[in-house]
Amino acid sequence: MTAAASAFVAEDEAELLAAAEQYIRFNVGDHVFAVPISELLEILRLPTISAVPMSPPALLGLANLHGAVLPVLDLRNIFRIPPQPYGDTARLLVIMLNKPVGVIADRVGQLIYLDEMQIDRNIAAEKNEAGLLAGLISHADGAAMLINFGEILQREFTAVPAVAEPAGKADQFYAPAEDEQDESIQLIAFTVADQEYAVDIHQVEEVLAVPDKLLKIPNAHESVAGVFSLHNKLIPVFYLGAMLQSTAEKNSGRMIVASIQADGVTFSVGLLVDEVSEILQVEQDAVKDVPNFFGRNNSGPEITGVYPQDNGKRLTAILSLPALFGTELIKTLLSSLRDTYAASAIADQDESAQTTQIVVLRLGEVHFGLAIECIDKIVRAQNIIAVPKAPDFIAGVINIRGVIVPVVNQRRRFGLADIGSQSSQRIIVMQKDGLSTGYLVDSISQILQLDHEAFEPTPDFLSAQMPMIKKIAHVQAGEMIMMLDHDEMLNNAELATLAEIQAAQQPPAS
């Protein structure tokens, strides 16, 4: 070939490349797909993907992408590819549509250049069921399929019609009369050395796992566990058992972060306890005065009352944190931090006005959140009475101070397998339309106080499918918590069924 001819060929190839677009090939099972590089944001190793209950089969789950929620599509389900575990070569491809969407490739292949002549846009119907493909690629390295992501989102994530409310059911909801509503207090209950205690929930900022790294204080009093940093604030941590002189043991499973006031300054302190067990809604008249024999010979003002449960078989001592931290010893221990707290007190107050307190619950390996103000109480999962011929998602009913409360098995409600009865299970009691309903969950793991910036809405194309999950909360280390909207946890037909069960099981008034 002459030099002139070679130059002409080279120039022709350059023009073709300039007109071509770059694609990347990837494999899902035995199928080969391709995506334009212009639509590809990132290729990542597989992150943690949280399954979303009651979501469309086309959604594999949600992942955390640099602090944002990333929906991950299940191409195996969409294209009827046999399932198999992902290997070491699997990668997450982040594709930009209106917003980022992820897909998982078993293996990522090579880059190729294609012009429009190499793409068949007129795909035969039998090869393109429901229009899921945008084209077929013909290339020297083998054919590949272009995915019609817009059609997938339209087909797989359409809105679910709402269930109409049955006529004549609204009057069956239990709505207590105004004179039935006693003044009540909300308490967080916990155990220390097998004794049950509780504090007013308004004094509690967060409930956390015990930090791995507590800075120990040399030659400190036995009640001092150390200090650690929380939200860029130094927190002194105490062994509550040692403060109460009930035990010298240092076994602790949870830390309660509480607010106290001393000399006009608000302090945050950590209290190490064995287990946080319940959130209780307690009528004032149910709290009994402290008997002389309770606890120490002189219980002092630290214990303000006793709440009997299970017909007096369990006694919960209600603590006064101001009194507990009002002793000269504790004041001395806190004095070294007073200047630090005084300087940041105003900033802390401004910050607290922009935070939301949530209860974190667990179902399987997935964590969900509920705004704490939506919760009436959290109780141990016991004495659940089965209801014959009830729908499968109903675990039964419980009796709370003479009121029958239907209990939803949240695992069944979300399509998860039962785990049987376990000591960690709790029942979260909430109200909607005057009906108290309990939700059986695997456990309560934390109470967190999060800035408003930590929340973001559920991706648009998922919100219609999952009305019970309207927000995602981002917490430390990239962990995500799916926020449940208690108003959407049950539809109107299910609420009517629960109201019927409650009415049928409620004992007649004497």
Image (cartoon, rainbow, N blue to C red):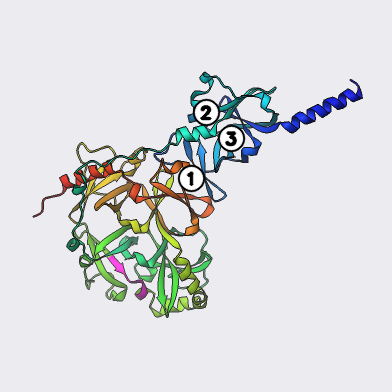
Q: CA distance from mark 2 to mark 3?
A: 23 Å
Residue beneath disc 2: 132
Which quadrant holds the C terminus? bottom left
- On residue 90, the disc is 3
**Image x and y of residue 70, in percent:** 52, 44
Mark 2 residue type: Leu
Residue beneath disc 1: 459
Give the left or right position of residue 346, taking residue 162 as reference: right
Task: Say above or below: 223 vs 459.
Answer: below
Mark 1 residue type: Pro
Residue stretch in magenta: 317-322
Q: Are marks 1 and 3 in contact (CB under 8 Å)?
A: no
**Image x and y of residue 481, in percent:** 45, 50
Q: Secondary structure at mark 2?
A: loop
Q: Are marks 2 and 3 in contact (CB under 8 Å)?
A: no
In which image quadrant can residue 421 be found? top left
Q: In the image, is residue 49 part of the stretch drawn in magenta?
A: no
Quick one: label 1, few (<14), some, or many (20+) residues within 10 Å?
A: some
Q: Secondary structure at mark 1?
A: loop
Mark 3 residue type: Ala
Q: Nearer the viewer, residue 94 or 316?
A: 94
Q: CA distance from mark 1 to mark 2?
A: 21 Å
Give the left or right position of residue 140, taking residue 82 as reference: right
Give the left or right position of residue 38, taking residue 270 as reference: right
Instruction: Name which residue lies at 80% across and 27% down.
Output: 12
**Image x and y of residue 161, in percent:** 35, 38
Task: Say above or below: 245 vs 169.
Answer: below
